[in-house]
Image (tube, coloured by chain):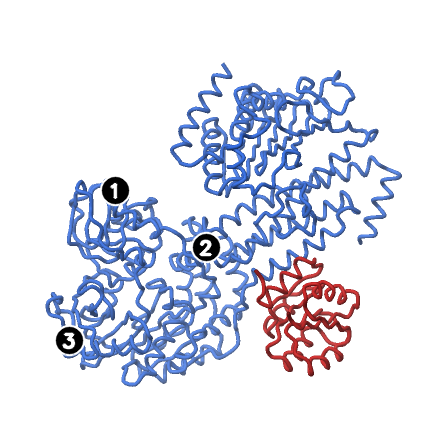
Amino acid sequence: MYLKQLFRHWTYQVFAPGTLLRRKYEAFKSLLAHDAVALELIADLEEMFYGKRLADRQRAVWMTNRLSSAVATMAGQLVEMNPTRYMDLPEYFRKIDFYVRMALELEQPEVGPPYILSLEEAGALPKMAGGKASNLGRAKGLDGIPVPPGFVVTANAFNYFVDFNGLGEEIDKRLRQMVVGDRDLLARLTAEMQELILAAEVPEEIARGIRFGVSEIIEGDDLIAVRSSALAEDGEISFAGQYASELNVQPNDVLEAYKRVLAGKYCPRAVAYRISNGLTDSETAMAVLVIPMVDADTAGVLYTRDPDCRGRDAMGVYGVRGLGHGLVDGSTSPDKAVLTRHADPRLDADCTPDTGGLPSEDSLVRLGKLAMRLEESFGRPQDIEWAEDVTGELYILQTRPLQEEREEAQAAKEILPVSARPIAEGLERASTGAGCGTVYFASTGERIAQIPEGAVVVTPSLKPSLLTFIGKMNGVISSTGSRASHFASVARESGVPVVVGDVKAKLEPGQLVTVDGTGGAIYDGCVEAIMTRARDGQQVSQRVVEQYAKVAPLTVKLNLTDPQAEDFTPTGCKSLHDVVRFCHEKAVNEMFSVMDKKGRGMNSAKRLETSLPLVMYILDLGGGFFANAGEGKTISPQDIKCGPMWALWYGLSDERVRWPSRLTAMDWEEFDKVSGGIFSFDSKLLASYGLISEDYLHLMVRFGYHFSVVDAICGPEQGSNYINFRFKGGGAGFDQRLLRLEFIRLVLDRYGFETTTRGDMIDAKCARLPENDIRRLLMRLGYLMAVTRLMDMRMETEEQVDAEVERFIKDAESRDG
Amino acid sequence: MANILVLDDITDAGMLVKRILERKGHKVWNFTEEEDALKHSTCNRIDLAILDIKLKKMTGVEALEELKKVNPDMKAIMLTGYPTLETARESLRLGAQEYCVKPINKEELEAKVAEVLGTGE
C-alpha cells in the first residue's frame, strides 16, 4: 500500500506537478477539517476528564474513538502530502492509539453462573451479590444476629439478562449520549432504557432459580421484598435511596418485580448519582436481594454513632409504626431514642424525647446490643435497618457503613460576627456544613425541576425526588423529615447542609440566607465565617477525575509545544493531541514549502514586513495583493488588497497597543514561571500564516502558547459574508486562561457574535451581515487579538474582567470614531 | 543492578535492548530461542524478563507463563510490534507489569525498566 502511494507521488512529481499540488491542497483541506473536529473533541474530553462536565464513561470511550479516527485521518493526509517525510508517523499514532484503548478498556461483564446465591454465600461474594446483600449475608453468618432467610440473584444474572436480550448495544448507545446537566435528555434516555429492561424476558435459567428460591424462603402466599443490591451500593458510596425496592410482592409477581428493580438501575437520579461518583454502568451491575416481608409492628433505622446528642458518643434509634418506608423516604417524622454505646446499652432518658413509634425499652436495649455487635464485626460505625414484628421478634434487614460526615463539616463552631442575625435557631441538624444562597420554595415537582444553581431550597419534606438536583443546592430547609432520610444521607455525602424545622413563614423567595447545618440555624445574608466551611463540599468526587488519570495524558495532554524543539517529531508524540499538533504544524509547513517553489501555477507565500513582533507568511490565492506588489519574497501591509485582511490588520496594528520587541525583566520573570523558559523569539512558535484572496481570509495567528484563527469572507454579497473566529490556549495557568477567555467572550457577545466555549477554547461566529459591518467587526477583532496577547498573565480576578471589558469597548469605539 | 533476560526472535532487536540496558549497568542475557531462555532461567536468578510476543515456536505470553513457573517473583515487560487487547489482558493477568508497543526509544525503555524494577526517580 505504502509503496504504491510512494510510486504515485513520484510519478506525479515528475509528470504532473499541477495534479500533485491539487492533491496536496485537498489533503491539506481534509487535514484542516479533521483538525477542527479533533480540537473540538479534545476540548469536550478535557471537560469530562477534569470533572467540569459529568457524563457516562461510555461517552468518553465513544468520543475518544471519534478523536482517534479524526487523528488517524490527519496522519494519513499528512503522509499523503509528503509520503517520504512522515512515513513513521502512522506507526507512532497506532502505538499511542493502542495505549489509549488499553487505558479506556472497560471490564468485560461476567455473564456466566452462578445466578443465584444463598444469603449465607453472599457474605463472602460482594462482587456477585452487591453491597447490600453481601453485608446482610455477613450479618447472617454472625452468631445470634436475627436476619430473615433470603437469596440473591447475582450481578452475573443481570449481565446475562442484558446479554440474552441483546440490550448491551442499546444501553451503551444511550449512555454515551448522556450528560448529567441536561435533564430532559437524561429523562428521555433513562426512560427508554427502563422500557427496554421491562420489555425484556428473564432467561429461563434465572427464572427457574428465582422461583425455587422463593419457594424455599416463604410458605404459601406470604409476601416477599425484592430489593436492589447493586455492586457498589452500600460500600464507600452509599447510594442511599437511589435504587428502587419492591415491597409486599406476591410470590407470583416475583419475576416482574425483579425486572422493575433491574430497571431502577436506570432511573435518572440513580444514573446521575452513579456518574457523579465516577462509577461505570458495569461497576454498578444490579444484583437483587429477595427476603420475606416482615409483618412489622415498628420499624426504622439505628445509627451506632449519632451526633445529635452527647457528641457522637451515643446510638440513635429512629422508628415509626408499621413499615419503616415513611421514615427513610422522609415523609414522616420519626420517634427517636438514644442509647449508650456499651456492650449492654442503656436508654439515655435525657436525650430521648418520645418513644411512641418505638418498641419497648427492653427491645430497644436488645436492638442496641445487636447493633454494637455489628459495629464490632464490621469494624466501623453502622447504619442499620431494623423491624420488630407483631410477636416481638426483632429482625436486622440491612446494615451498611454509616456515612461519615466530611471533616470540614465537623469543624469546631466558629465565633460569629456580631452583625449576623439568626432568622431561626435550634433546628434539627440533618446534614452539617454550611451554605449560602437565595431562598427558593420547591413545593411541587415542577418547582423542583426548576431549582436554580446555588439555591437554598425550602421544602415541605425531604423527598427523594430532590436528590436529582442536589448538585444545584447550597442548602436545604425542610419543614418535616429527619437526618434518618435517604436525602439527608446523600446530602451529608455531598456536603450540602440540611436543617429541619417549620420556619418557612420567616423566609421570602429570593432572600439571601446562610444555612448553618452544623449549628442548626439560619442567618440573614451571607455569613462569611460559616460559608467558608462549605466551599470544599462543592467539588466533584475525586473518583470522577481519577478514572481518567491514565487516559488523559495519552489523549488530551499537549506535550509538543515548540515546533523547533528537538522532540517535535513523530517519536516525540506522546498523546493524540500531540499528533494533532504535529500534523497541523507540518501540514501548514508543507503548504508553505509548496508555495516557496516557483513556477507551479501559484504565487509563493510572502513574508509580511511589519514592525510587530510577528512572523507572518501570506499566500495569495488570487487577487489578494495589488498588482504592483512586486515579485519579492516579502510584502508590506500597503500591498494587501484583500478586504478582510486589510480590516483585521488595521485593528491588530493599532498604535495604542504596545508591542515590546523585548519583554521587560518583570515580564520575563512572569513568563518563565509559566513557560519554563523554553521560549525564544526566533522560535517558529511565533510563525503565523494567512491565505488570502480578494474577499477571503484564512489567518492563523500564533502568540506563544495560544493561537487565533480567523476565517472570513467580506464582500458585497451580504449572504456570503461571515466571520468565524477561534481562540485557544495560553501560557498561564488554566484559571487565568479562563479569565481571559471570559473577557473575550463578553466582548464578542457585546458585538453580537454567537460564542461557545469549551475548556480553554472559544469559538465565535456571525454571518450574513453587510460588508461594512463585517469590516468593522474584523477591525475590532484585530484590535482584540492585539490587546489580549499576554492578557492571561495579568488576569487574576473576575472583577478585573468586567473592568477590562468596559475599557476595551470604549477604546475600540473611540478608534472607530 | 538487575539480571535481565531478553527474548526476541530477531537478534538485532534483542541486541539493541541489551546494549541500552547494559549501559545502565544491568546484566543482560539475550535469546532468540525459547528453549535456551527457559533453560537459562532454571539455573539463574532472573529479576526481569523483556519478551517479544511473536516468537519462533510459542507466543511471548506462553513464554511468560513458563518463566513465571520457575521464577514466580520475576518481573516482566512485554514488547511487541503487533499489540492486541487480548494479549495485553492475558499478559497482565499472568503477572506482566508493562505491555509496551514498538517502536520504543531508548528513553522510554529505560524509564519503563526503572519503573518496573522500582528504581525510577
Q: CA distance from mark 1 to mark 2?
A: 39 Å
Q: CA distance from mark 3 to mark 2?
A: 51 Å
Q: Which residue is mark 1?
A: A526
Upstream in the sequence, badge 3 or badge 1? Answer: 3
User: Residue A261's spot in the image, x, y percent?
Assistant: 39, 68
Q: Which mark is residue A189?
A: 2
A461 left or right of A165 in image: left
Residues at discs 3 and 1 both on one chain = yes
Instruction: Identify the residue at image location x=85%, y=48%.
Output: A7
The image quadrant of residue A262 is: bottom left
Upstream in the sequence, badge 3 or badge 2? Answer: 2
A116 left or right of B66 in image: left
> Which amino acid, by three-letter code, is at mark 2?
Leu
Q: Which mark is residue A346?
A: 3
Q: Is residue A201 above or below residue A527?
A: below
Label 3 or label 2, whichever lies nearer to me, is 3
> Which amino acid, by three-letter code, is at mark 3?
Arg
For the N terminus of chain A, give its image quadrant: bottom right
> Which amino acid, by three-letter code, is at mark 1?
Cys
Q: Chain of mark 1?
A: A
Label 1 or label 2, whichever lies nearer to me, is 1
B76 left or right of A390 in image: right
Instruction: Identify the residue at image location x=54%, y=31%.
Output: A789
